[in-house]
Image (tube, helix red, strand yellow):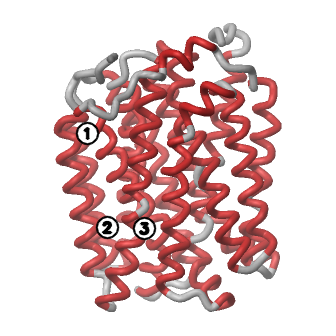
Amino acid sequence: MTQPSGALRPLLGVGIMLVAFNMRPALTSVGPLLETIRTTTGLGTVGAAYLTTLPVLCIGLACILGPVVIRRLGADRGILLAVAVVALGSGLRGLGGSGPLFVGACLAALGIGLSGVLLPGLVKRDFPAKVGVMTGLYTMVLCLGAAAGAGFSVPLAQATGDWSTALGLWGLPALVATLAWIPFARGPDPAEGALRRRSLWRDRLAWQVTGFMGLQSSLAYILFGWLPVVLQSRGLDASEAGYVTSLLSIGQAPFALFVPSLAARVKDQRLLAAGLLGLAASTLCGLVFGPLSLVLPIGMLLGASVGGLFGLGLTLIVLRAGDTARAGDLAAMSQSVGYTLASLGPLGFGLAHDLTGGWSASVALFCGIAAAAGLCSLGAGRNRTVSRR
């Protein structure tokens, strides 16, 4: 597919933002309602851990399908399929009960994973001169979608009198994005599929980018699933915990916009990664062990670090790829393996709490994951590109 004309490019940008908005509410809307869900369905701690883990695992599995979807449907039709699946999965949760909840969550996650693979290559293809800006913009909108899911789910449940209806309503914005993307759903470019036959699985740099992407994502998914529960254990009610989690997501937005633009302008991103990882670890410790009077500013700083890390991870995929084809390959590899790795974070965080009865072991796990991400960034942040053959 050729690049869009000057008149169509802004509309394509708007379409990308609508898709990006729907890449997180299906994940962040569950955490604030998790205690209510557990009470009404009898879901135990282990079940809750699986509820926060399985969607992340499904995101990773969906990423494996990215290159296949590009060859068969093209990136543009692939995004249409992805956001439609998000709408279906989100709406399915509105049927009530643990069955539709788990199935809907996994379906929505499959769509989220697929769109996450396709968007970086599309940005590199259609906005080659504005990679940092466009990556920052759609990452910022993605964070705003995460904030909406965290902040509005409890009020929606209170207004409708039912947690399942509140979760199901998040299918509506995904449906709007699906309809808005239809005009851009063109067929595949035959050259794209041919270029993607080369493998990156033996490339050391590709594995370093993959490790960084997966480990920093694990930090975010731990927070999406467990931060409201942590805050409620410290004395906040469900609405207050959801509000703080929403502020955390809002705090992601400025750094999600700023960090990709900065990362695209500098040759070496290692120092940037180290600073953001250190901020994430220290602010989570502050939320768990610090005074409740500082929960809002600390939560905003934690959100800033997580938003910056996610934006940096996406930018590294584009920067370490030499062309559009490599960007698609690296996105598929880093997100399929990375999100599968990331799925272990929420599970481990919950099980550590279940085994010890406190949050200290869980926080230690979080800090260990941040340290491992730092090690991966030592290679992923260097000014190199993955091999072409």
Mark 3 residue type: Leu
* Earlier sequence position, callout 3 versus callout 1: 1
Which numbered mark, 2 or 3, is in the foreground of this view?
2
Image-quadrant location for residue 208: top left
Residue at 76%, 32% (x, y): give it: 181
User: Mark 1 = which residue?
Assistant: 208
Residue at 38%, 27% (x, y): give it: 199
Mark 3 secondary-structure assignment: helix
Q: Residues within 10 Å of mark 1 (few under 14, many from 20)?
A: many
* Earlier sequence position, callout 2 versus callout 1: 1
Mark 2 residue type: Leu
User: Mark 3 = which residue?
Assistant: 296
User: Mark 2 = which residue?
Assistant: 284
Q: Front-most of 297 and 329?
A: 329
Picture coordinates of residue 15, whole percent (x, y): 70, 31
Residue at 36%, 59% (x, y): give it: 219
Q: CA distance from mark 2 to mark 1?
A: 25 Å
Q: Front-most of 295 and 71?
A: 71
Q: Residues within 10 Å of mark 2 (few under 14, many from 20)?
A: many
- Position of 348 with respect to 28 (left or right) is left
